[in-house]
Every structure is written in C-alpha cells, then in structure tokens.
Amino acid sequence: MNSTIDILSSLGIKRSGADPVVLVIAAHPDDEVIGAGGVLRYLKKAHFYHVTDGSPRKCMDAMNAGCTSREAYARVRREELLLALKHAGFGPEDCSRIGMIDQEVSFNMAGLAWRIADIIEEWRPDAVFTHPFEGGHPDHDATAFAVSKACALAKKKTGSVPKIIEFASYHGNGGIELVAGEFLPFPRSKTWKVILNDIECDLKQGMMDCFKSQRQTLEDFSVKEEIYRFAPKYDFSKAPHEGVLYYEFFDWGISGRKWIELANEASGLLEK
C-alpha cells in the first residue's frame, strides 16, 4: 500500500526543507479534486489555474443546475470550487482563472500555451499537475497540449522546466463506456497509485460533495485511490487511441479529426 507522502516523494515534489512550488492547471473547476483531491492538502505552495469557467456556451448544463444563464452557472461552479478547496486549506487568492469557455479550449491552444508559459515563467514551479492526453474531453486534451508546449517555451527562456505530473481523468475504450480514474496505457510509462487513508478519503469526499451541480458526473469517480505519472512524450498530431474518442459520442463541439487539425495548426504557430 502506497501512502500519499510516498507518492509525492516518488514524484520528486516532497523534500526536506522548503515546500516545492506547484501549479495545478485544470480544464474545469472540480477536475483537480477528482484527480488529485487526496494530495492537495500536502501541496503547501500550490496555486490553481482553471482554463475554463466550467460553463459551456450551450445552456443545457446551466439549466440542469437550475441556472438561468451561462454566466450564472459559471458563478455557481466558481463558488463550489472555492468551497471545496477551502477544505484543503486554500483560499480565493490561490485560485486564478484563465477565462476560456467550457468546450472551446481546443480552438485557441496556441494562445493558451503562451499564457501558461508566462505563468510558468512567473512562478518558476517545481512541478505542474495537469491532465493526460486521452480523448476523454477535448478541453482536457487541449490543456495537456498547452502545458506540454508551454513548458517547452519556458525552457527556451529560463533553461529549466518543471516536472509535468498527470492525475488520472477519464477516457473511453473505443465505445461509449467511460473509464474513470485510470490512465490510458502508454508505452514505458510508469504510474504511481496511492491508496487514500480514512482521513484523506473523508477529506476528498467532503470536497467532492461541494460540487452539487456536478453530483451525477462525480458518481463515476472513486475517493479511495488516485493514480499519477510523469507526462509521457505525446505525439499530438495523432489521436490518443484508435477508434472513436469518448467525447465524440457527445455534442461537445468538436471531432477527434478536427482536434488534431487544430493541434497541428497550434504547433505551427508555436514553432514560429
């Protein structure tokens, strides 16, 4: 059984002396709690950046949450996030918003990469926690792309680059079935699994309970264990797996083929 501290040590971000500076870059408010809620309270010098406000332009999710507008739903999601992170010892000053619209990150991946590169240059973090590239949600994949490219840009300026540590999100199996809390296998990629103790489980459950607007979605995720890995060297010019990507089963505004086209365009802009 691996403890949370063991995992942090294995990932090279828990050491004697000063606490490491960590950025948590998540696509939506709640993603960091789903993937890393058991670890967050140990990251004393963490700062959270949310790429989107969690509210799609289409208002179906907003209406399902009892909101009358996209903006109202975004406010609800922000309030839920702040309440959840308060459980782990963080306040509003620790949570910044990049300000993109849910389901639209893929359409400005280059801009996001430049923004994250500036954030990395500002904070000079030891590690960045973020999503894997797995075809689960286009915003997750776009965030993974942007963090990877941003670290490369930052390295050109500073000569150093933070560790990119992935928390498990979700993906499909080529069909409609959701695979939650596990990584899509990647060759020669080592993973670390942590079994949360009772205190950590209760804390994570309390954090997840704060996301009342996401209650149905969160039912698929465990509060008993988490899994991490260093980000593999992805080829963003190819789909993360064969077959239909999970998000292609939903009206989330983009196909896998279009996503790859946009990623290739963004890579070209970033390499100029």
Image (cartoon, helix red, strand yellow):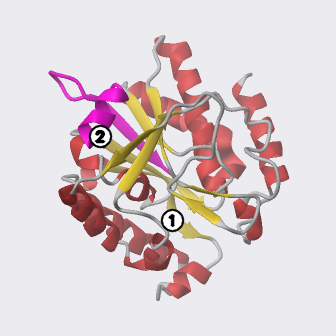
Percent coordinates x, y for residue 99 in the rendering: 50, 55
Percent coordinates x, y for residue 143 in the rendering: 58, 45
Q: CA distance from mark 2 to mark 1?
A: 21 Å
Residue plotted at (74% across, 72% down) = 251
Q: Earlier in the sequence, mark 2 or mark 1?
A: 2
Inspect the image, locate mark 1, and give the three-letter code of the amino acid beneath it.
Answer: Gly
Name the residue furthest left. Answer: 17
Q: Could you say which quadrant of the image residue 212 lies in?
A: bottom left
Label 1 SS: strand
Residue 125 visible: no
Q: Is 44 placed left or right of 195 in the picture?
A: left
Label 2 SS: strand
Name the residue furthest front. Answer: 1
Q: Is 119 placed left or right of 22 in the picture?
A: right
Say above or below: 92 vs 10: below
Q: Which residue is mark 2?
A: 46
Percent coordinates x, y for residue 13 in the rendering: 31, 28
Toward the viewer: 180 or 143? 180
Residue 162 lies in magenta, yes or no?
A: no
Say above or below: 133 vs 82: above
Toward the viewer: 20 or 221? 221
Q: Quadrant of the N terminus?
A: top left
Q: Which residue is mark 1?
A: 54
Residue 20 lies in magenta, yes or no?
A: yes
Question: What is the span of residues highlighted in magenta in the rendered image?
Answer: 1-26
Q: Is 236 placed left or right of 198 in the picture?
A: right
Percent coordinates x, y for residue 18 in the rendering: 17, 24
Residue plotted at (36% across, 25% down) = 126
Residue plotted at (50% across, 49% down) = 168
Q: Quadrant of the C terminus?
A: top right
Residue plotted at (34% across, 68% down) = 208
Crowding at label 2, few (<14), some or many (≥20) Cα neighbours within 10 Å? many
